[in-house]
Image (cartoon, rainbow, N blue to C red):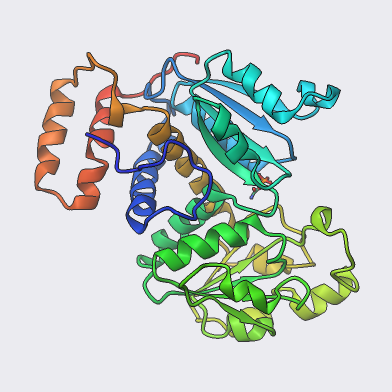
Amino acid sequence: MKAVLKQRNLLGIRGLSAGEITYILDTAETFREVSEREIKKVPTLRGRTIINLFFEPSTRTRTSFEIAGKRLSADVINISSSSSSVSKGETLLDTARNLEAMSPDLIVIRHPSAGAPHQLARVCRASVVNAGDGSHEHPTQALLDALTIRQRKGDFKNLRVAILGDILHSRVARSNAHLLTTLGAQVSLAGPGTLAPPELASLVEGSELRVERRIEDAIEGADVVMVLRIQRERQDNAFLPSLREYAVHYGLTRKRLALAKSDAIVMHPGPMNRGIEIASDVADGASSLILDQVANGLAVRMAVLYLLGGGLGTMPQGYEPTTQAKSETKKVETQSTAEKATAPLRAAVTAGGSDSSNS
Ligand code: CP
């Protein structure tokens, strides 16, 4: 089966079609099951090499990309800015060319500069995955957010999503704005005027993105309330009078959350500033899906590595599915299009079984 993901790289959500997004989410759903097994490993990317290149701090993204690669049986190498020769003055492109000389299959990059993954993609034969570039995009975060929303809400059509806080510096907000509007959700952005200026309404061409001045107006009637971190490291001007004042006027409290629908869900990409953009009782409350987001991050990153890394969707010549895999594949011939799209993967994961060997 040919994968329906047209891109060789995942540099952003902008430009992905609704079909491509749905295909990645369907594939991720298939991989969730692997993490529930006793032996959480499949041979899907055995023999492939993944380099994780992180030039900014990260807990969730870096760890989940590493675990994802290892659960797919790839060889995974982690490089951080302090441990790379960039700290000795080497340019990013020279680093990339040197890594490329070692023939990796995938390079995952987080970088403080917008566009760094695109630069890498221009010089590398390996597929490049953007793990967050400056204030530009964080595509796998938006995909894991979408998977979390879909699991709870089912459909995105006319779903009301409020994205609150430091929109201006947020790659998460940008990727989510593209993804959610592409799938038909109604998205409202809100925050202080300095961090959520009205011009952001034109962030996604042809969409009905709203920018509210008062966060209460965005939260009212929302199905999903997504809170963003105040990014002090990207603020070189006086965007906020004080964090205390921000918490009072823009923090998500229980009182403000009560304006949303009674079954609204609360999300935050992490890391959280508790007591600033989100009250602790909201972050830990019954509506919070913050840790579900993290669990889904692993499944989404397995799906992305699988789809771009030439997994079973583009199996090398000579691959002979087992009888069980063949019968699984035959079974899905009568299933829906979405089920059909991930059928070979499901069949192969079943046929390949668990792999407890070290990668
Ligand atoms: N959401 C997110 O990107 O978290 P990390 O910075 O910990 O990777």
Task: Kindly identify the residue that appears in the image at 24 percent across and 25 percent down.
Answer: 351
Q: x%, y% of residue 254?
A: 67, 78
Looking at this view, is 1 or 286 the one in front? 1
* Left or right placement of residue 56 versus residue 351 in this view: right
* Left or right placement of residue 236 versus residue 325 in this view: right
Task: Kindly identify the residue that appears in the image at 90 percent across and 71 percent down.
Answer: 242
* Left or right placement of residue 11 versus residue 157 in this view: right
Numbered-mark total: 0
Task: Kindly identify the residue that appears in the image at 71 percent across and 30 percent down.
Answer: 92
Whether 23 is drawn above or below 187: the answer is above
* Left or right placement of residue 269 versus residue 128 in this view: right
Looking at this view, is 40 or 226 the one in front? 226
**Res. 10 in view:** yes
Task: Kindly identify the residue that appears in the image at 69 percent across and 84 percent down.
Answer: 213
Q: x%, y% of residue 107?
A: 56, 29
Q: Where's the N terminus, which quadrant? A: top left
Whether 311 is drawn above or below 161: the answer is above
**Res. 258 in view:** no
Q: x%, y% of residue 17?
A: 37, 55
